[in-house]
Image: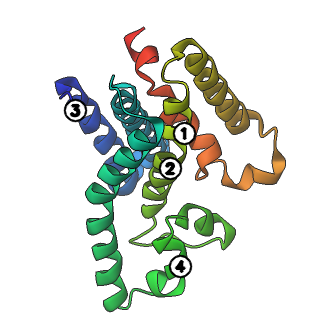
């Protein structure tokens, strides 16, 4: 994977925004710094993941998909599940009560569904969105890898539809999940498509 030095600067900005939201309360009242920080992380992640998927090779769709998921699994699962296990052993109430949601990477929906309070593990919702993205996004990109014009049109559609839902809530039935659901947050992840950034 190519190293993009400038992305480190963007990561710093994203982390700074999240820290402002959580610790600089006098600023957090006036700007949604945390939201923009997480959003920037999503854009970066979308860029890196799509770049990996678009890398030329002669392998089949099935092999590319399996290899991608395998790499993501080895990179994310061990530390994620080790953290869940440690918090479970420490008897953290949120983990004990909603364990199934955490182990299936669906806590982003449970947080809203059960109107859960903020806790030390609330931020796991964004990890859940990314993991859902890792399962879904390769199906789109790898299917249209050789037809990149159609891929770009589809991604633009996903990005536009996601932001339209965020702004106008055109599907009220899922409106409660606008801030934490894959459908809407995929607009930010899709915005990281290399063609948008390079163009």
Q: Is the C terminus in the top left, top right, bottom left or bottom right quadrant?
A: top left
Residue position marked by numbered label 3 in the rendering: 1
Q: Residue at x 18, y 29 (%)?
A: 3
Cα–Cα gap, marks 4 and 2:
18 Å
Q: Count neighbours of disc 2 (C-alpha within 10 A) and say few if under 14, some if 14 to 19, many if 20 or more.
A: few
Mark 3 / mark 2, whichever is N-terminal:
3
Residue position marked by numbered label 2 in the rendering: 135
CB contact under 8 Å: marks 3 and 4: no
CB contact under 8 Å: marks 1 and 2: yes
Q: Is residue 106 left or right of residue 171?
A: left
11 or 24, nearer to the observer: 11
Mark 3 vs mark 4, foreground winner is: 3
Q: Count neighbours of disc 1 (C-alpha within 10 A) and say few if under 14, some if 14 to 19, many if 20 or more.
A: some
Q: Count neighbours of disc 3 (C-alpha within 10 A) and say few if under 14, some if 14 to 19, many if 20 or more.
A: few
39 or 86, nearer to the observer: 86
The location of residue 93, given as percent across then percent down, is: 46, 87
Mark 4 / mark 2, whichever is N-terminal:
4
Residue position marked by numbered label 4 in the rendering: 100
Q: Which mark is residue 139?
A: 1
Mark 2 lies on a secondary structure that is helix
Q: Residue at x 27, y 58 (%)?
A: 74
CB contact under 8 Å: marks 3 and 2: no
Q: How is the image coloured?
A: rainbow
């Amino acid at each position: 994977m190519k190293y993009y030095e400038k992305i480190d600067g963007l990561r710093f900005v994203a982390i700074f925004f999240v820290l402002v939201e959580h610790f600089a309360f006098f600023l957090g009242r006036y700007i949604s710094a945390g939201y923009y920080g997480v959003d920037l992380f999503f854009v970066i992640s979308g860029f890196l993941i799509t770049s990996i998927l678009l890398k030329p090779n002669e392998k089949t769709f099935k092999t590319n998909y399996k290899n991608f998921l395998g790499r993501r699994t080895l990179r994310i699962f061990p530390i994620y599940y080790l953290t869940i296990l440690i918090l479970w052993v420490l008897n953290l109430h949120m983990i004990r009560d909603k364990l199934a949601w955490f182990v299936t990477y669906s806590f982003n929906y449970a947080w809203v569904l059960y109107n859960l309070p903020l806790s030390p593990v609330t931020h796991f919702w964004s990890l859940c969105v990314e993991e859902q993205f890792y399962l879904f996004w390769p199906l789109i990109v790898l299917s249209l890898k050789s037809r990149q014009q159609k891929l770009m049109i589809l991604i633009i559609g996903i990005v536009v539809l996601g932001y339209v839902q965020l702004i106008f809530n055109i599907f009220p039935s899922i409106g409660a999940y606008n801030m934490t659901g894959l459908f809407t947050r995929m607009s930010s992840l899709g915005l990281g498509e290399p063609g948008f950034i390079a163009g």
